[in-house]
C-alpha cells in the first residue's frame, strides 16, 4: 500500500502553476466534501457488514491513538469518504541513474519532497515522460491514503477501507503520525517513522490494546508478521542501496554500470523472493526512483523498533521520538541516539 502526503502537496503546489493548483484543489475539495460522519453511517441498518466492521475499527484505533499513543487525533478519521473512480492519486518520483539521488520538488511550508501527486493518470504520465527525457529513472504509482498534516479532518477513504482490518489500522496510525509530527524537508524520516508508528502501533493495538479480540487472535499474529516482513524488506533494500552507492562511487562506464546494477537488482530480488517478501519483478529493470521510493518508507526500521521493548512502552517511545526529532538538525541521528540509549537500558 502506498501512502503519501500528496494531498497537502497538491494544495500547496504553488502559484507559479495556477492550472495545476486549481485542478488539484478542486480534486481535493471533492474528496473532503464527500465526508460522512462515521457514527451516522453506523446508525444505518443497511450498512454493508464489512464496511461497518472497518468503520467501528477506525473509531477504536482513533481512541487508541489518542489515549495510548498520544498522537494528535483531532477530528481525523471520524468521517468516511467514498472515492470517485477518477479521484485516484498518482504519485510521480524520479532519480538520477548514476547515483542514488532523488529528484525533488519544493513546496511551501513542507520543504522539498521526492514526489509529486496528480489526480489524473494522464497528467502523471506526461510529467514522468518529461523527467525521463532528462535521463532520469522515473516511476508512477498510485496512493490509497493521504495526510493533510492536520490542516483538514482527513477521512477514511473507501480505498483504504477495502483493505483487511490490520492494514486499515496501520493506515490510520500511519497518517495520524503525520498529523502529530512533520519535519520539513525530511521525507524519508517522516515516512519511515510513520511506517514504524503504523505497523508497530497495529501490533500493540491487536496484541495487547483495545483490538486484542479473543474471537480474532489471528489479527495479532498478522500484525506481527507484517511488521517483521516490512523490516526484513527494508534490510534487503538497504543492502542493495549500499552496494549501488559503492558502484556509482566507482564511476564505471555506462554499459558496465547498467550491467552491474541490473545484476545487483536481480540478486536483491532473489533474496526477497526467498524470504517471501516480493521478487525480482519488483526491482528489475533496475530503477533508482523505485528503490528510493521504497526506502522513503523503509529506512532504519530496526532502529525505530529498538525504541520499544514492550507494547506498554510504545506511547512513551513515540513521545520521545517526536520530541527528539523536533529539536534535532538530523532526525535520523536523533533516532539512532535514542535507540542506543534504549539498547543500554
Image: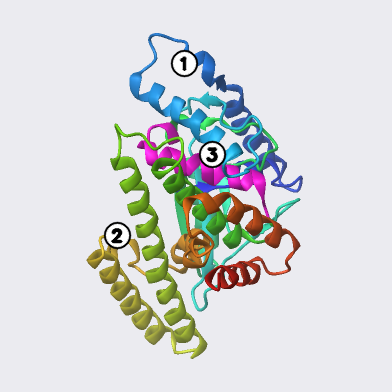
| In magenta stretch: residue 174 | yes
Foreground mark, 1 or 3, reads: 1
Q: Nearer the viewer, residue 110 or 198?
A: 198
In this view, which residue lies farthest toward the front?
A: 345
Quarter of the image holding residue 160? Answer: top left
Foreground mark, 3 or 2, reads: 2
Cα separation, mark 3 vs mark 2, equals: 28 Å
Which quarter of the rendered picture does the C terminus lie within?
Answer: bottom right
Q: Nearer the viewer, residue 58 or 255?
A: 58
Q: Residue 297 placed where, x, y %?
A: 50, 58
Q: Residues within 10 Å of mark 2 (few under 14, many from 20)?
A: some
Q: Are discs 1 and 3 less than 8 Å apart at CB? A: no
Q: Are discs 3 and 2 less than 8 Å apart at CB? A: no
Q: Residues within 10 Å of mark 1 (few under 14, many from 20)?
A: some
Q: What residue is at 34 percent from the left and 68 percent from the top?
A: 285
The residue singled out by tag 1 in the image is 42
Q: What residue is at 33 percent from the left and 41 percent from the top?
A: 219
Q: What residue is at 46 percent from the left and 58 percent from the top?
A: 139
Q: Is residue 156 above or below residue 169?
A: above
Q: Residue 271 placed where, x, y %?
A: 28, 71
Cα separation, mark 1 vs mark 3, equals: 30 Å
Q: Residue 343 placed where, x, y %?
A: 53, 71
Q: Nearer the viewer, residue 143 or 272?
A: 272
SS of the residue under disc 3: loop
In this view of the protein, can residue 28 be seen by the observer? yes
Q: What residue is at 51 percent from the left and 50 percent from the top?
A: 312
Q: Are discs 1 and 2 less than 8 Å apart at CB? A: no
Residue 119, which numbered label?
3
What span is colored magenta in the figure? Answer: 160-182
Total number of numbered discs in the rendering: 3
Quarter of the image holding residue 290? Answer: bottom left
Amino acid at each position: 500500500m502506498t501512502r503519501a502526503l500528496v494531498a497537502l502537496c497538491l494544495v500547496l503546489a504553488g502559484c507559479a502553476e495556477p492550472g495545476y493548483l486549481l485542478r488539484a484543489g478542486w480534486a481535493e475539495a471533492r474528496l473532503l466534501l464527500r465526508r460522512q460522519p462515521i457514527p451516522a453511517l453506523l446508525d444505518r441498518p443497511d450498512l454493508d457488514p464489512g464496511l461497518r466492521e472497518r468503520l467501528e475499527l477506525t473509531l477504536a484505533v482513533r481512541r487508541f491513538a489518542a489515549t495510548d499513543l498520544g498522537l494528535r487525533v483531532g477530528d481525523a478519521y471520524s468521517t468516511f469518504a467514498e472515492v470517485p473512480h477518477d479521484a485516484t492519486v498518482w504519485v510521480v518520483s524520479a532519480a538520477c541513474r548514476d547515483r542514488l539521488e532523488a529528484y525533488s520538488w519544493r513546496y511551501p511550508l513542507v520543504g522539498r519532497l521526492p514526489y509529486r501527486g496528480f489526480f489524473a493518470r494522464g497528467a502523471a504520465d506526461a510529467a514522468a515522460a518529461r523527467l525521463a527525457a532528462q535521463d532520469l529513472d522515473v516511476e508512477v504509482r498510485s496512493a490509497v491514503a493521504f495526510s493533510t498534516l492536520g490542516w483538514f479532518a482527513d477521512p477514511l477513504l473507501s480505498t483504504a477501507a477495502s483493505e483487511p482490518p490490520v492494514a486499515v489500522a496501520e493506515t490510520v496510525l500511519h497518517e495520524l503520525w503525520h498529523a502529530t509530527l512533520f519535519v520539513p524537508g525530511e521525507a524519508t524520516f517522516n515516512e519511515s517513522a510513520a511506517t514504524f508508528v503504523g505497523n508497530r502501533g497495529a501490533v500493540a493495538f491487536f496484541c495487547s490494546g483495545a483490538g486484542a479480540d479473543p474471537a480474532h487472535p489471528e489479527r495479532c499474529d498478522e500484525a506481527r508478521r507484517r511488521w517483521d516482513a516490512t523490516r526484513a524488506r527494508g534490510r534487503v533494500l538497504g543492502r542493495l542501496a549500499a552496494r549501488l552507492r559503492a558502484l556509482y562511487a566507482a564511476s564505471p562506464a555506462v554499459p558496465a554500470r547498467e550491467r552491474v546494477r541490473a545484476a545487483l537488482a536481480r540478486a536483491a530480488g532473489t533474496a526477497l523472493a526467498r524470504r517471501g517478501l516480493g521478487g525480482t519483478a519488483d526491482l528489475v529493470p533496475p530503477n533508482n526512483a523505485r528503490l528510493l521510493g521504497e526506502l522513503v518508507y523503509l529506512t532504519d526500521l530496526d532502529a525505530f523498533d529498538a525504541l520499544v521493548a514492550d507494547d506498554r512502552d510504545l506511547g512513551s517511545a513515540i513521545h520521545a521520538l517526536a520530541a527528539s526529532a523536533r529539536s534535532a538538525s538530523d532526525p535520523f541521528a536523533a533516532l539512532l541516539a535514542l535507540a542506543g540509549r534504549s539498547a543500554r537500558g
